[in-house]
Image (cartoon, helix red, strand yellow):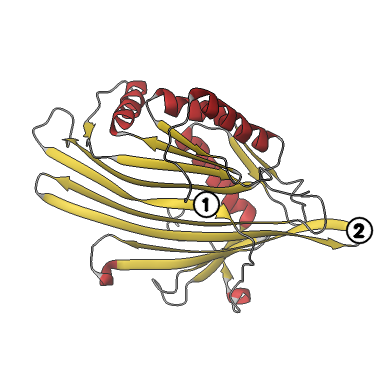
Amino acid sequence: MSGNFKKEATAEEFAVAAEQMQDAAEQDKVLGGDPESENWTFGLDSRAKLTVKTTVNDTESSVKLDAGYKISFTNEKAEDKITTKITGAGDVSYNEGGSKSDEKSFKFYNDSEFAYIDMSSVTEGMKIKMELKNVLSMLMLFANSSSGLSVSMSVNDGESAADAEMSATVEIQEVFSSLVSAGCKVYIDDSNGLKIKISVTAEALTQLLSETFADMEIPVPYSVSAAAKCDLYFALDKEDKFAQVSADFDISLAGAATGGSAESASVTLKGGFYVKAYTGTVALPADIDTYSENLLPGLFPGV
């Protein structure tokens, strides 16, 4: 994210910026406009690129991931009722070997009713669809079990965006404050909207890692490289509407492969992601009606 991030923010400047972010979320400014109006639209464009390299003794392995997704919400009025049309499209590619022949990829789409997955590049002719509400339920179940956060979402066909529920019990100010207390550096650019950059230093990463393993009541198996870096970005436009969240990181960890053993291991994570406001449209493929309704293989045990 471009911006003027040369001068580190004071505690007072950071408190004001964090409160502005919190107020924008609580007062529903982040979506922009009135989600109940017939001309309301909102969209997101996202992409993540990640390379993970691991070494155990002299054995090396790496995984590369590149994933993107665009989604558009558009209100439509028919017979004095406003409904929200949802259209999304994305792609995923990953490589666990290193050569081009090891790369796997697939595309996915969604409308207000179904999620569509095109895996024809992996298995010829495999194009399936699943009810969107079932996919969302599974994602929320996974998010709740893996993060410990209470997250809920429901999207029903014909429902307006104002009626669709999306909530997460996370206080923005608390998250920011915990990062700062760990030793992260904060930079603020409020010349055109609000942009916040939080630089997570190697020392801060070490503290956060120590606190995480302390909660699990086990010793920290890895040490953080002094050259490690992670920059987080948050932005609102001049109307306090969501503009962007992004990050870039290059983190190396080293330690024992298994607790207390003589084996050595290292892990390097390099890459970044962005989620930003999107005003364009999203198109579905012309053959979307030919996708067969089925479960994604491997999604459930025994399937």
Using the numbered discs, state the Cα–Cα distance from disc 2 to disc 1 in whole angstroms: 34 Å
Q: Give the percent coordinates (x, y) of residue 280.
A: 63, 65
To which residue does mark 1 refer?
Answer: 275
Q: Give the percent coordinates (x, y) of residue 261.
A: 11, 31
Residue 132 versus residue 72: which sits nearer the camera?
72
Residue 59 versus residue 20: which sits nearer the camera?
20
Q: Secondary structure at mark 1?
A: strand
To which residue does mark 2 refer?
Answer: 80
Looking at the image, residue 194 lies above or below residue 208: below
Q: Nearer the viewer, mark 2 or mark 1?
A: 1
Residue 241 versus residue 5: which sits nearer the camera?
5
Determine the image quadrant of residue 215.
top left
Residue 149 visible in the snapshot: yes
Looking at the image, residue 87 lies above or below residue 16: below
Residue 171 visible in the snapshot: no
Circle 1 packing at 10 Å, graded few (<14), some (14-19), many (20+), is many
- Taking the view exactly as shown, the residue that stands out farthest to the bottom is 286
The answer to whether residue 68 is left or right of residue 53 is right
- Taking the view exactly as shown, the residue that stands out farthest to the right is 80
Residue in the picture at 29% in, 29% down: 203
Q: Secondary structure at mark 2?
A: loop
Label 2 is placed on what type of residue? Asp
Looking at the image, residue 224 lies above or below residue 153: above
